[in-house]
Image (spheres, rainbow, N blue to C red):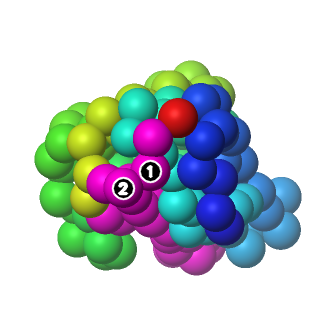
Amino acid sequence: MDLRGTSLVEVRLEGIKSLSLDFAPECILVSPGTVVRFTGPFESVPLVGGVAPNPAPDGPFATATTTGSSKDVAFPDPGTFPYFALGHTALFEIAWGAVIVDADATE
């Protein structure tokens, strides 16, 4: 989803009650400097950087989010930043997505 020019974007983790996890929207294209607000029950379904199922804490996702119900993450630099959420039990599917920061887009 192209959201370039938007300074604050929300990405929601959905499907907790159905155990079928999904981020909405999953993949977004944003401008440098955009803040993405991730929402979900991170104490039961942590938000992690990397490509599932292998965490790769780096850049904006330097640490996993394991508490709270929202996390603001700034994306100042161009690049592609994958992320995923994996429940603590095998009952949950893996939800994944990516933030793509367009080097040529400015606000």
| Residue name at image x 63 percent, y 31 percent | 8
Residue 43 placement, left or right of 104: right
Query: Callout 2, which amino acid?
Result: Asp
Residue 55 placement, left or right of 95: left
Residue 89 image offset from top left, x and y in percent: 51, 64
Residue 82 image offset from top left, x and y in percent: 35, 64
Give the SS element for disc 2: loop
Sort mark 2 into few (<14), some (14-19) or many (20+) by Cα contacts within 10 Å. Answer: few
The reply to whether discs 2 and 1 touch (Cβ–Cβ < 8 Å) is yes
| Residue name at image x 50 percent, y 69 percent | 96
Residue 67 image offset from top left, x and y in percent: 48, 26
Where 68 sits versus 104, above or below? above
Front in this rendered view, residue 97 or 17: 97
Residue 8 placement, left or right of 74: right
Where 83 sits versus 44, above or below? below
**Is residue 44 visible to the viewer in this orientation of the structure?**
no
Sort mark 1 into few (<14), some (14-19) or many (20+) by Cα contacts within 10 Å. Answer: few
Residue corresponding to mark 2: 104
Give the SS element for disc 1: loop
Residue corresponding to mark 1: 105
Residue 39 placement, left or right of 73: right
- The numbered mark at residue 76 is none
Query: Callout 1, which amino acid?
Result: Ala
**Is residue 2 visible to the viewer in this orientation of the structure?**
yes
Per the rendered image, the range of residues in magenta is: 80-106
Where 38 sits versus 97, above or below? above
Q: Is residue 21 magenta?
A: no
